[in-house]
Amino acid sequence: MHLWELGGGIHLSDLIKVGLTKQNFANAVCLVVVDLSKPDEVVDTARYWLKVIQHRAGVVASELKDDGVDVVQLMADKQGSPQAKGIPIYIVANKYDRFKDVNPECKKVMARTLRAMAYEAGASLVYMTVTESADKDLQSCVKVFRNLLNSNVFMTERLKVFTTDEKRALAIRAGDDKEEKIGMAPGGDHSGASWSRKLDEDLKELEADFKRQNINIKIPTREQERETDEKVQNVASIFARLNKDGRGVARRDLREALLEIGGGKLAELVHSSEVGGTPTVDPEELDSLTLWWRSMLKMETIEGEVGMAFDPEEFKEDKVDSTREMRDHELEKYRKACEAKVRKELALKGERKQGEGKKSRRGSTTS
């Protein structure tokens, strides 16, 4: 089993090309971890990584198809996300202990937002904490999380969990939730986008309350919001210009236009016809892409610019294998050195004991 952690923020997201490949696609499980102690970043973090996973899954599935693999059949028993070509996905809302006692209404809206996003992504949703506590609600987090993850990784039997009570830690398996159970966001619909707008409003209103609980809410400045709005509007204008017949825009044409305005990361997510399944991008797909891009732009103000933060050549399979061999060799040398040190210390202790025994015998003879 291999574990790949894409830590360090969104600027390392290109590393998913290393962690998710044709070789491990059938056995992959992806976790999107969000930090409930930073509630203003939860939605954008989840939205960003979900789209990155879905995009990479589409690319790898297309490569497998070119190799003659029936991906649908390959992933049939995985109970995974249809949007990620069958790969199981978990949204793990960590540090629940920090969020457990916040304003009840905001806690409810956060829960509904995450449920809606998980439902749309075909993902499981679990609240998590590693804090030791006598609180049974907190204790249940680790147990439920381990069971659900083990069921996908080691094919163990799943617990039948369906906890949607906002007063408790949520635990919802993919496929168990329903739109009508989630409900409609005030002034909107069932979508994660509508619920996230309500969450943004609540976080701004309750900023002072959160601060008293040592939770800082970062509110974007008007200048930052204006810049983001201008970039998103620019994309919408380009799409409207290219969508002459109202049937969508050719994928290649849209990618080239986005590259011209510096929207390289957004252009990357515009699939080719082979991966996207259609020769054009329709307004619905564009809305999904621009929603993701808005989240990316917001996260860049917090974590830094997204970009190629590594050299792909360093992560080719043969080099990864040689690096592992080198690491294993070094570990073996270290183990042998430790064993030799222990043997030497034991030998010295034995010699000291023998010396003390001889002195004791000489002393008794003299007396």
Image (cartoon, rainbow, N blue to C red):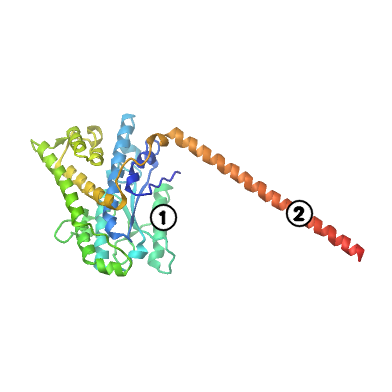
Viewer-proximal residue among 132 and 87: 132
Disc 2: CA contacts within 10 A as few (<14), some (14-19) or many (>=20): few
| Three-letter residue code for mark 1 | Asn
Viewer-proximal residue among 176 and 31: 31
Kindly state the secondary structure of the residue where label 1 is placed. helix
Say whether residue 173 is visible. no
Q: CA distance from mark 1 to mark 2?
A: 49 Å
Disc 1: CA contacts within 10 A as few (<14), some (14-19) or many (>=20): some
Residue 138: percent from the left, percent from the top? 39, 65
Res 182 quadrant in image: bottom left
Given the current orientation, which residue lies at the most extreme right position?
A: 366
Which residue, given by chain and number where applicable, does mark 2 sit on? 350
Which residue, given by chain and number where applicable, does mark 1 sit on? 147
Identify the residue at horizontal 54%, vertical 41% (top origin): 328
Q: Which mark is residue 8?
A: none
Res 248 quadrant in image: top left
Residue 221: percent from the left, percent from the top? 21, 57
